[in-house]
Image (cartoon, helix red, strand yellow):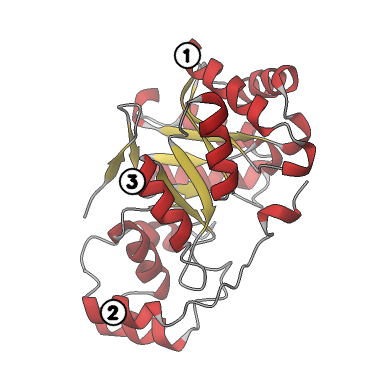
Amino acid sequence: MATSFPLRDGRTIPAVGFGVYKVDDAEAETAVATALDAGYRHVDTAEMYGNEVGVGKAIRASWLDRDDVFVTTKVWNDHQGRDATLRAFDASLERLGLDAVDLYLIHWPAAVNDRYVQTWRTLVELREQGRARSVGVSNFQVPHLQRVIDETGEVPAVNQVERHPWLPQHELMAFHEQHGIVTEAWSPLGRGRLVDEPVLTRVADAHGVSVAQVLVRWNVQQGVVVLPKSVTPSRIRSNLDVDGFTLTDADLAAIATLESGQRTGSHPDSVS
């Protein structure tokens, strides 16, 4: 199985990252330390999560070289626009205690505010300065992506979106493939709601793994970066342990029957 995927800017991104949404600062420090010890080399945080300090402490306290850990953070909706984004980025770096991040994302398009194109230009500026090594977006739909590409000529390296068997995002995936954008999946377990799904349970039992491992493998096997989240050490480790099995065509066909369009998070058009 691929351990990393190429980005359009020539860099690579680890295929499995560690998510810390709704994890407080102190707990994030402990969880990230456990994840790094388990073998994760990709940590995904955000200004809005309120845990950049804890994430940064864990990274700096680890035995790993800085370049061995891929760090993502995001600018929140209230801070879109050039000047506000630059201030937000500097504040994120200060909280993380880092000189640069590996990936900086626009958290939501917040299209009603009509600042995401200007914000995207600002992220490109940060990339050109070398302080954000790669830049991308999160929760963008095809019209948002098309607009930033048309108006700036710059294509995001990544689009991080909700993705799981209920919501496989076929239209976005096709657009991403056409334009060389890496898809990144948040809520890969459907916020825990998919762990008791009978189809997934049967697939997991057939391979002797957990449903969470099936869902991580399902994404990576389709070329999608995936961000499982847990604060339980045993689950942190098992979520990364997906090399020992391969989902068959029959498995993938069974999982495809779960598509319903159901979201566990907000629709991008509703977020301002």
- Identify the secondary structure beneath mark 3: loop
Q: Quadrant of residue 90?
A: top right
**Could you tell me residue 29's position as x and y percent?**
57, 40
Q: Which of marks 3 and 1 is nearer the N terminus?
A: 3
Left or right: 71 in relation to 9: right
Label 3: which residue?
39
Tell me the tag on residue 128.
1
- Identify the secondary structure beneath mark 1: helix
Considering every residue shown, the one lying at the far front of the view is 150
Q: Quadrant of the N terminus?
A: bottom left
Label 2: which residue?
251
Q: Which of 191 and 123 is in front in this view?
A: 123
Which residue type carries mark 2?
A: Asp
**Could you tell me residue 134's position as x and y percent?**
44, 27
Q: Nearer the viewer, residue 87 or 8?
A: 8
- Identify the secondary structure beneath mark 2: helix
